[in-house]
Image (spheres, grey):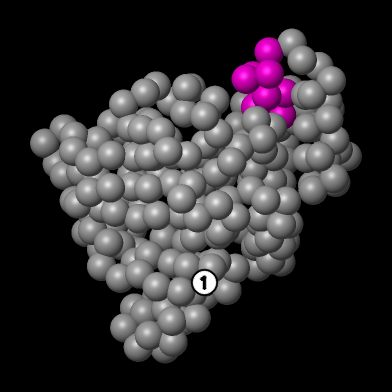
């Protein structure tokens, strides 16, 4: 098992955001988490990434507990998070934004350059724009940059928070095509997404979250054919 989240409870101040949440991911899978706004999906990713510390429960990655270590150490363990709000450095070039994602390799320029070539192969437009300020990119190109930057540390687990948010349909298709390509390169993916149809069609398995709890789980084809999921998330 690559990742195990065991009975996690997370809070913002006195407000409980996650309640007894458990999930697991096998190496090589794409797993999606679906739910309405405020269901706790982003908090779950932030808890795994160490940005929110759980009060109860455990997060175990590759057999090691990571729930009480610092976020930068979790990145070194092989977990990266692409946040919903992108958080690029707009006045820095595309190349420099990517370079920052490889900080775990220090001054190993050979490794860093090889990783940048891999990212450019996935996202040729980033190579074309490498000297542009990141803030001049379109929304879809910025999303590509955020994903590319996260790949610069060669993660075992890539977590994506709403990668389709605000993007045109053709760009959404392109982003999810690349998600499949990344997974084919043996990177495991945990995907939070409001577009339930596209998420379930790319994922192996899915979890449904409501009010900070996991309320349903199953293979993607099972969830796609579940009447409750159809009504609540698929629009029919």
Residue drawn where x is 16% and y is 44% of the image: 16
Residue drawn where x is 40% and y is 33% of the image: 64
Residue numbers of the magenta segment: 97-106
Residue 169 placed where, x, y %? 65, 68
- Residue 165 in sight here: no
Q: In this rendering, would 144 be left or right of 76?
A: right
Q: Which residue is mark 1?
A: 200
Q: In this rendering, would 228 be left or right of 182?
A: left
Q: Residue furthest top?
A: 107
Numbered disc total: 1
Residue drawn where x is 55% and y is 34% of the image: 78
Determine if the magenta segment contains residue 102: yes
Residue 119 placed where, x, y %? 78, 40
Dominant secondary structure of the residues highlighted in magenta in the image:
helix
- In depth, the one of 163 and 51 nearer the eye is 51
Q: Residue furthest right?
A: 128
The quadrant holding residue 33 is bottom left
- Residue 200 in sight here: yes
The relative height of residue 129 versus residue 197 in the rendered view (above or below) is above
The relative height of residue 212 versus residue 202 in the rendered view (above or below) is above
The relative height of residue 180 versus residue 62 in the rendered view (above or below) is below
Residue 221 placed where, x, y %? 50, 81
Q: Quadrant of the C terminus?
A: bottom left
Residue 151 placed where, x, y %? 67, 38
Indicate the secondary structure of the residue bearing disc 1.
helix
């Amino acid at each position: 098992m690559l990742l195990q989240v065991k009975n996690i409870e997370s809070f913002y101040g006195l407000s409980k955001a996650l309640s007894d949440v458990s999930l697991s991911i096998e190496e090589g899978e794409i797993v999606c988490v679906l739910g309405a706004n405020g269901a706790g999906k982003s908090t779950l990713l932030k808890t795994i990434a160490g940005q929110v510390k759980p009060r109860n429960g455990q997060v175990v990655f590759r057999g090691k507990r990571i729930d009480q270590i610092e976020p930068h150490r979790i990145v070194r363990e092989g977990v990266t998070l692409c946040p919903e709000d992108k958080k690029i450095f707009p006045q820095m070039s595309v190349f420099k934004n990517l370079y920052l994602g490889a900080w775990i390799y220090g001054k190993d320029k050979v490794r860093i350059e090889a990783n940048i070539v891999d990212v450019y192969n996935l996202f040729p437009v980033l190579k074309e724009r490498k000297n542009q300020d990141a803030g001049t990119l379109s929304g879809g190109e910025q999303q590509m940059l955020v994903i590319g930057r996260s790949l610069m540390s060669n993660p075992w687990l890539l977590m994506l928070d709403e990668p389709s948010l605000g993007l045109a349909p053709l760009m959404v298709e392109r982003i999810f095509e690349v998600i499949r390509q990344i997974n084919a390169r043996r990177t495991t993916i945990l995907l939070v997404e409001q577009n339930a149809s596209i998420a379930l069609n790319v994922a192996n398995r899915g979890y449904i979250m409501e009010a900070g709890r996991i309320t349903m789980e199953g293979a993607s084809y099972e969830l796609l054919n579940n009447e409750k999921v159809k009504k609540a998330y698929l629009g029919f």
